[in-house]
Image (cartoon, grey):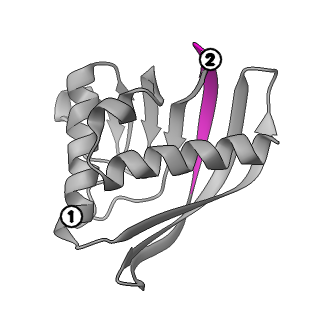
Amino acid sequence: MNLDIFQRHLDEVTATLMTDDFEAYMGFVDIPLVLITEKATTIIETREEFQFGFESYAGMLKSQGATQLIRLANNVAAYGAHLLTGRYETHILRGGNRIYGPFHSAASLRFVDDVWKVCAVVTPVHDDAFPINAVQEPRALSAS
């Protein structure tokens, strides 16, 4: 059941990215969001920061001609009734051909206001061509 909840959340968030629906996206995000990449740990606290990240990711998908963003959940664990943490694999495709991935990430979901919302993400992606970790410089807590 936890795997189904986690997968459904991934599918819903993915749909917002592929349809460029920022308002729907915000319904699946808990504030603040902790984003950890190889380059930085960032705490995203404002709607403007979320919009910047959303537009960076959605823009990257468009600029690369991505037609599918596939995220497959695995290894989901519950930590009480209102917190799930899981790993997932991401594939980015154009016309059925892989253009990026697969890569593995992890996320934590918190049950807030009757909705599962992401509150933390760990991802290895930091390629400049795929600015998934694009954040405004003042918000970065650490960099390598």
Where is residue 132 shown, x and y percent of the image? 32, 52
Task: State left or right for residue 139 relative to residue 120.
Answer: left
Q: Secondary structure at mark 2?
A: loop
Considering only vertical position in the picture, is 47 above or below 118? above
Q: Position of residue 88 (x, y in %)?
A: 62, 56
Residue 113 — which label?
A: none
- Residue 92 versus residue 36: which sits nearer the camera? 92
Q: Is residue 97 magenta?
A: no
Q: Of circles 1 and 2, which is in front?
A: 2
What residue type is disc 1 on?
Answer: Lys
The residue where tag 1 is placed is 62
Near mark 2 (Cα within 10 A), the count class, few <14, some 14-19 or many ≥20, is: few
State whether the magenta stretch is mostly helix, strand or loop.
strand
- Provide the residue span drawn in magenta: 105-113
Inter-mark Cα distance, 1 to 2 = 32 Å
Look at label 2 and name its amino acid: Asp
Most extreme residue toward the bottom is 97
**Of 74 and 121, which appears nearest the observer?**
74
Q: Quadrant of the N terminus?
A: top right
Q: Residues within 10 Å of mark 1 (few under 14, many from 20)?
A: some
The relative height of residue 121 versus residue 46 in the rendered view (above or below) is: below
Q: Earlier in the sequence, mark 1 or mark 2?
A: 1
- Where's residue 105, x and y in %? 56, 54
